[in-house]
Image: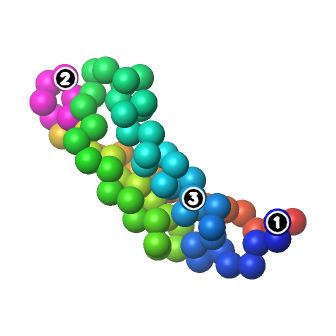
Amino acid sequence: MKTTNYNPSTIEVEFAKIISDLKDTIQEKAPHYQITEIKNNSRLDNPHLVFTIVDKDGDRHELLMQFIQRADA
């Protein structure tokens, strides 16, 4: 499939949603952290997810996962 729009691309948006939907699976694989929220900013250029997590000490952290599709070769 030839991509014509990269800002954001369909693939970037779809993969951001897929990862966001896997919250429960990710939580099972990371038992020492509690995922309290996932903000899905998939409508932006270079969509990203912001994971808010709490560690075993009760400290709050944020992790950012960004999706960037390279231009078709």
- Image point (43%, 48%), residue name: 20
**Label 2: how many residues lie within 10 Å, few (<14), some (14-19) or many (20+)?**
few
User: Badge 1 is on which residue?
Assistant: 1
The spot of residue 68 in percent (x, y) is 61, 61
Q: Is residue 53 left or right of residue 10?
A: left
Q: Please tell me which of labels 2 and 3 falls first in the chain.
A: 3
Is residue 3 depicted above or below 56 in this figure? Answer: below
Answer with mark 3 or mark 1, whichever residue precedes in sequence: 1
* Residue positioned 64% across, 61% down in the render: 11
- Residue wearing tag 2: 56
What residue did someone put label 3 on? Answer: 14
Q: Is residue 56 a member of the stretch shown in magenta?
A: yes
Task: Please tell me whether residue 38 is drawn above or below residue 10 in the rendered image.
Answer: above
Give the numbered dot on residue 58. none
Under circle 1, the secondary element is: loop
Residue 49 lies, in percent from the top left, at 41, 55
Residue segment shown in magenta:
54-59
Q: Quadrant of residue 57?
A: top left
The residue drawn where x is 20% and y is 34% is 54
Kindly identify the amino acid type of the residue bearing the numbered disc 2.
Lys
Q: Total label count? A: 3
Indicate left or right for 47 with 28 as reference: right
Quarter containing the N terminus: bottom right
Task: Determine the CA span between mark 3 and mark 1.
Answer: 15 Å
